[in-house]
Image: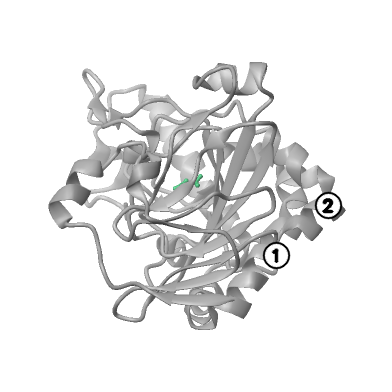
Amino acid sequence: MIEMRLRTRTHPDALTGMRGKVLGDADHDVLLTGPARVLMPDGRPLCVYLPGHLSPVLADHPEVYEVLHGLRNLKSDNRGLASGTRRRPIPGQQRTRAKRIASAVIGSLETAQRQTYCRLTAWTGDHLPEYERLRPLLRSMSAALAEHVPDRHAAQAAEVARTHADYIVPGTVFSTVTVNNTYPTGVHQDAGDLAAGFSTLAVLRRGAYSGGRLVFPEWRIAADMADGDLMLMDAHQWHGNTAMSCPHGVRDDRMRACCGAERISVVAYFRERMTGCGPLAEEARKAEAIAEKRNQFAGKLTEADLYGTTRPRT
Ligand SMILES: O=C(O)CCC(=O)C(=O)O
């Protein structure tokens, strides 16, 4: 494996202008093509690229692709800059929304704004056997993190040990997984994952397409992730993808329907506020109590009535 220490970075003003943008090939100078460890100028790891690392586990477990492919119709308008657009206000609501993209969050989530209890995401709760079928892939990703970035893995494992087992993929240091299907992410930084930990990103690829390279634009480094490739990465650094195209065009429907092109990225990580969650059954009781109050008073209650005088953890 080659090791590379970066010296130069993109000027902050230029980087600001890139936020939310889908990148092009002019946004990187170095394309990683073999196993590589890339360090930032201060010695912290930016990424470790492991081409083909997951090919054996994907070959042994074809069901993993089937489950991930099955998630392609789950859309999200909550990915902010990663959607390649800016958030827009929703009339009459405090919430904002970005473009709808094929991005699904599966696994566990902590409390957030109006979701005042920890939980499994809706898909996960409804499809537990399918979620469990992803374990071989997730275990292999977690083991690679332990082997190649042991200090970050240890920091994450320590937080996992403080978290109720209901929320952790057994045999891994992951609580949560984002699965993206065939769209280029705009330049963004991930949020909510453990700062002292490290993120892991796998790619499964089908059909003919070009682009979709994973780029760290501040450092002008990229990888054209092939099927079975794994990137261990600091997701708090700006990152995004180059535009994707296939012989029939660039739109998502063209990519899938005409070219049979598919790029699935699987981002597995630990959400740092999961440590504050009670057992799943206890959190589910909280959720039921709130739903019951809502139903009883059908929209006549304030947040203080529902949650008490102080706002619960968000
Ligand atoms: O698909 C990729 O290469 C990047 C995915 C990503 O950055 C994300 O989902 O946050």
Please rate how many residues cluster around mark 2, counting C-alpha atoms within 10 Å: few if below 14, some from 14 to 19, many from 20.
few
Along the line of sight, which residue is nearer the eye, 207 or 83? 207
Q: Are marks 1 and 2 in contact (CB under 8 Å)?
A: no
| Foreground disc of the pair 1, 2 | 2
- Residue under numbered circle 2: 59
Tell me where residue 49 appears, x and y as whole percent.
Answer: 55, 64
Measured along the vertical axis of the image, is residue 311 above or below residue 136? above
Residue 209 circle label = none
Could you give the CA–CA distance between mark 1 and mark 2, rounded to whole angstroms? 15 Å
Tell me where residue 226 appears, x and y as whole percent.
Answer: 64, 49
Q: Residue at x 29, y 80 (%)?
A: 42
Tell me where residue 283 appears, x and y as whole percent.
Answer: 51, 52
Tell me where residue 159 appears, x and y as whole percent.
Answer: 48, 74
Q: Residue at x 40, y 62 (%)?
A: 273
Quarter of the figure with residue 25: top left
Element carrying mark 1: helix
Measured along the vertical axis of the image, is residue 69 above or below residue 133? above
- Residue under numbered circle 1: 139
In the image, the residue with mark 2 has its CB under 8 Å from the nearest atom of ligand 1: no
Measured along the vertical axis of the image, is residue 240 above or below residue 249? below
Q: Of the residues shown, which amino acid type is indicated by label 2?
A: Ala
Q: Is residue 125 left or right of residue 199?
A: right
Q: Residue at x 57, y 29 (%)?
A: 74
Q: Residue at x 60, y 68 (%)?
A: 35
Q: Is residue 53 left or right of residue 113?
A: right
Residue extending farthest right: 60
Along the line of sight, which residue is nearer the eye, 251 or 190? 251
